[in-house]
Image: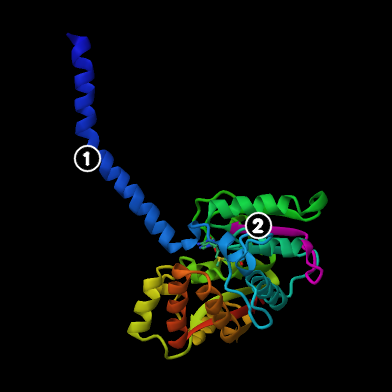
Amino acid sequence: MASILSPILSALSWLLCLPWKLVHLASGFLHALKKNLSDPYFVDFHSELNATSGEHHQSQTEWINMGYWKETNDFPTACKALALKLVQVAQCKSDGIVLDVGHGCGDSLLLHLEHPSIPRPKRLVGITSQIQHYRRALERTSVRNPGDSVDMCLTHGDAVYRGDTPSHPLDAKTYEGAYTTILALDCAYHFRSRRLFLEQSFKCLAIGGNIALGDICFAPGSLSLTTRFMIALMGSMPSENVMTTEEYVAMLRGIGYVDVKLENITQDVFPGFVTFLKGRGLAFGILASHFERLVSRGMLFVIVSASKP
Ligand SMILES: C[S@@+](CC[C@H](N)C(=O)[O-])C[C@H]1O[C@@H](n2cnc3c(N)ncnc32)[C@H](O)[C@@H]1O
């Protein structure tokens, strides 16, 4: 009798638990969806973008930024140009300690290891939020750092230190005053929040160290309710990061940074990026049109730099 009842009872208990299992599954799904909407890079679209001239051969590069299109109409070349512009503004020092935040698949890290115009750092540290990007960056940098000549340390995690990531590069207990340069290429507008990231970076910069960001902000007076609504539709820029150029500069000065500079390079970024995206199919075209509308409403791409006195 017991042997007949046992499978019936276990089937019944499985059925009784089913609603809870479904609730658990749905809440896991919603959590993942929310997380991924705030960091849209979970979809592997960079190989599509890096495949040059529409030929889908394996590309050597895995850039994911919006590019600096002044002298090119090629995506990887524009991305590299933007990265080089940022490094130039940051005035990286030979034998310095560089932190590259939001490095994605690691192309900007490779520039520090190999590019002839960039002084070789003593130590190169990185943190990026997508696990698959982190793994690619780890893989690519480990084979292109002969003899481990640069001391590398990459971490998977959020740019903002929240006490839950071991050896987080912005944990001030370990890294106060550590970095000669901090770089954030086309990513800080995603952070929760950019201000918190800039405050933590200030603590962890060495005296005389520089921070440089390729970032998005807005023209003074452009932040109407409609514009804010359109930014919110993108789902990838928390509202606390939506600010004008004036507010951005004031925030940096308020934190304690000096020598604050903000260069508006919108015309060399968005038009080229939008034209490029429009040639890559419907989904990218829709994104491009949304960017275009936001640019006409005052969205700017800026290079921001500042120092710790
Ligand atoms: C536009 S991509 C730029 C990637 C890289 N800098 C490049 O130029 O190829 C933004 C990167 O920032 C990362 N990111 C977004 N939010 C982040 C966060 N809160 N903390 C760390 N990285 C983040 C994304 O996963 C993505 O790799």
Left or right relative to 282: residue 51: right
Q: Residue 177 in the image: x percent, y percent?
A: 66, 64
Circle 1: residue type? Pro
The image's mark for residue 19 is 1
Residue 75 visible to the viewer: yes
Q: Indicate which quadrant contains ligand 1.
A: bottom right
Q: Nearer the viewer, residue 22 or 216?
A: 22
At a point 61% along the width and 50% down the height, the residue shown is 135
| Amino acid, disc 2 | Gln
Q: How is the image coloured?
A: rainbow
Residue drawn 18% across the image and 15% down it? 5
Q: Quadrant of residue 98?
A: bottom right
Question: Looking at the image, which residue is at 43% across and 83% down?
Answer: 293
- Image check: 115 left or right of 273? right
Quadrant location of the C terminus in the rendered image: bottom right
Q: Residue 223: percent from the left, percent from the top?
A: 40, 85
- SS assignment at label 2: loop
Q: Quadrant of residue 50?
A: bottom right
Which stretch did the figure color magenta?
114-127
Between the C-alphas of marks 1 and 2, the distance is: 46 Å
Instruction: Please report whichever mark, 1 or 2, sits nearer to the chain's N-terminal start.
Output: 1
Tell me the tag on residue 58: 2
In the rendered image, residue 87, in percent from the top left (x then y), is placed at 70, 73
Quadrant of the rendering where the N terminus is positioned: top left
Residue lying at the far top in this picture: please name it. Answer: 1
Using the image, determine if residue 308 lies above or below residue 167: below
- Number of numbered callouts drawn: 2
Residue 270 disc label: none
Neighbour tally class for label 1: few under 14, some 14-19, many 20 plus, Cα within 10 Å: few
Q: Quadrant of residue 34?
A: bottom left
